[in-house]
Amino acid sequence: AFANSGIVALNNHEFLVLERDEGFYLKDPSKAMKRVYKIDLNQATNLHNVANNNEIKQDSKLGLTINGQTLEQFVLAKGWDGLAALNIHPAPKTLVVDMIKQVGYTHDKMEGMWLIDDSHLGLLNDDDFGLWKNDRGLEQKYLDNNHNRMDRSTLYVVDQLKLGLKK
């Protein structure tokens, strides 16, 4: 499962979003995913402007519903193509940096983002104080299967980006 664990505004409609799984690159390189995407809300459907009809209702508690399902439930059942068929489009995302390819990001969680300037982005892992709980109790959190590399707070600075900040 993927999580979005951080967001920072570039302007009033573009944002950087952290998208990650909880896998460790050193434990299973084929499954770990840690990326930063740029999204643009101006290119997404404004859900407040979607009119009610037989299928679609604006619910005061749940927001926009389709056949009684929240958007999340609907997408899980029908996929993104199901939304597109109703002319509802999410914000497009563009890859800014793949942290595994760019810096060999070894941690399970990426949760902090620091927008330094148009070409530099700082990213921080969440090391859970270097501990986690499992069936044996509270233990040291390791980045690898051999327990050679302990997890600890690490700040990564990615450079040579073109984030499109307006001066």
Image (cartoon, rainbow, N blue to C red):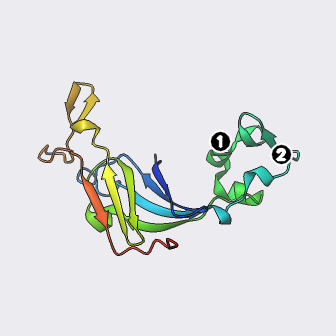
Amino acid type indicated by mark 1? Gln
Q: How many marks?
A: 2
99 vs 66, nearest the viewer? 99
Q: Between marks 1 and 2, how big is the CA–CA gap?
A: 14 Å
Q: Which residue is mark 1?
A: 73
* Left or right relative to 91: residue 154: left
Residue 55: assigned label: 2
Of residues 2 and 8, the one nearer the viewer is 8
Residue furthest out toward the front? 167
Q: Is residue 96 above or below residue 90?
A: below
| Residue 105 appearing in the image | no
Q: At 22% from the left edge and 24% from the top edge, which residue is drawn?
A: 136
Residue 124, x across and y down, in percent: 31, 52
Residue at point 77%, 50% (across, down) = 48
Foreground residue among 128 and 69: 128
- Pinpoint residue 57: horizontal percent, then vertical percent: 81, 42
N-terminal label among 1 and 2: 2
Q: Residues within 10 Å of mark 1 (few under 14, many from 20)?
A: few
Residue at image x 33%, y 48%?
A: 23
Question: Type of residue at label 2?
Answer: Glu
Asked which secondary structure carries label 1, the reply is: helix
Which residue sits furthest right? 54
Q: Relative to residue 160, is residue 163 drawn left or right?
A: right
Label 2 element class = loop
Q: Name above or below for residue 95 compared with residue 67.
A: below
- Camera-side residue of 59 and 8: 8
For residue 30, say whether it is visible.
yes
